[in-house]
Image (cartoon, rainbow, N blue to C red):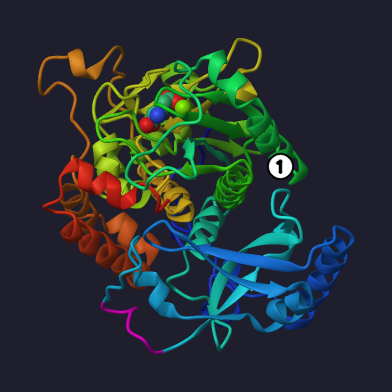
Amino acid sequence: MTTGTVAAGPTASAPGPAGPVGPGGRPAAVALPPRAERAERAEQAADRLRTAAVDAVAVTWVDNAGIARVKAVPLGGLVHAAEWGIGAAPCFDVFLADDAITTSPIIGGPTGDLRLYPDVERAVPLAAQPGWAWAPGERHTQEGAPHPGCQRLFARRMEAAAAARGLSLKAGIEVEWVVALAGAPQDEPLYPTHGPAYGMHRLTDLSDYLRDVLRGLGEQGLTVLQIHPEYAPGQFEVSVAPEGPVGAADTSVLVRHTIRAVSSRHGLRASFAPVVEAGAVGNGGHLHLSLWRDGHNLGRGGPGPHGLTAEAEGFLAGVLGALPELLVLGCSSPAGYLRLVPSHWAGAYQCWGLENREAALRLVTGSTGERSSAANAEVKCFDPSANPYLAVGGVIAAGLAGLDQRLALPPEFTGDPAAAAPGTVPRLPQGPAEALAAYERSAVLREALGEPLYEAVLAVRRAEGEQYAAATPEQLVAATRWRF
Ligand code: GLU
Ligand code: MG
């Protein structure tokens, strides 16, 4: 939860979306540090993890279908993994959520290998998986060059592109999930609580479970802002403190897997699918963002609507205008379009509004007295099937493009867009094909992602769109309910 925006308009020397370039023509932000430095950092991390009785480290990356994939090493192998990487096939870039594999013009096929490098500084013992630690990974080639399909490196490039303009961002991804009894049949979620939406009843029924979720997140160094029952049956939400965009994406992976691990210890099963029951309110993956320069929140103190600076307004206008194509990154599964419907607080309309929960872009100014730190914008239309690195990176790319072009926001929409005269407020794409058509027109995303990643995402979305083109909502929900 935060927000922001930014700064200087276009200049002749403004860096491109990939940010500054380092030796060898590689973007400096994503080059591997020297091997000796990696080894030293890994030794320090291993010492830290050893004192926490860690036996093994799970290193994750998130594929283009939104699934976290993993390679694990024993703790004794962490330094070697940091020096040489862990083998990981490039074909993971074209995996679908059901583990089918497609292909793309640049990445795909059974040959080749990449090296997965753990971010050892982020490595943390897992509270609900004794003996295990987790670290996010990023992928480079066997020659040590950044893998152009690596989603975390993409997010880092976008963070660096903002930094090259003197800007930083704070981000937070809210995590909503539905919890069901682990032993229930796959196609019939049975809930461990039947308390009302937002009801204390639900918290009371599951107080040990929710306490263990909170404890686990806290022991892992996360600051929880709040946890509460949500609207749909068995649904809860947790939000954590904002941090840099790549850190926020990492955190969303950690939060989700902590909830999953705690759930399993309580005989429960968590679903982060966009929709768990056809027709019901779904799980959102709302992305909060604020833009900062020199310690100032650019979402405040400016002449624009609700105090936005011109830079913040340009950034948000860029994001708002690009939402149809950003859905390809923020709403991976075709099931996401079952969630993205009016009157579900999912942000199905391409408009913005102060505290408007039906607008895809909700402006949050916070309370009087805290606005300079609290003001932020929330992208509501995203769901937890997103690869969080693609989601944050894509939003930054679109925002910086809007900022560079000094775009202005259209008029604010207040009230319920569903109650407005038809055609007054545009609906966001209502299916994957519509979002993909916008993505294929997006020069900004194509340039920011780079051709290999852009094409791999396109291939995965097309394949999943075709897989479920004839599926009923019930079939699509059943196929995706336990995949995320
Ligand atoms: N569950 C809703 C969604 O699908 C969001 C509810 C809320 O505003 O927190 O995005
Ligand atoms: Mg919520």
Q: Is residue 298 above or below residue 202?
A: below
* Quadrant housing residue 222: top right
Instruction: Quarter of the image for the N terminus: give it.
Output: top right
Looking at the image, is 382 positioned above or below residue 68? Answer: above
Q: Residue at x 59, y 12 (%)?
A: 367
Residue under the point 57% across and 32% down: 238
- Magenta stretch: residue 109 in it? yes
Position above or below: 366 against 111: above
Magenta stretch in the rendered image:
105-111
Could you say where residue 369 lies in the image, as x and y percent from the top left?
A: 66, 12
In the image, taking residue 72 as reference, residue 365 lies left or right, namely left
Going by the numbered disc 1, the residue's amino acid type is: Gly
Residue 342, percent from left and from top: 24, 25
Q: Main secondary structure of the magenta part?
A: loop
Residue 298 in view (yes/no): no
Asked if residue 340 can be seen in this view, the reply is: yes
Looking at the image, which residue is at 77% across and 72% down? 75
Q: Quadrant of residue 390?
A: bottom left
Residue that label 1 marks: 216
Q: Is mark 1 within 8 Å of ligand 2?
A: no
Q: Position of residue 257 (x, y in %)?
A: 58, 50
Check disc 1 and report its element: helix, strand or loop.
Answer: helix
Graded by Cα atoms within 10 Å as few (under 14), some (14 to 19) or many (20 or more), the crowding at tag 1 reads many
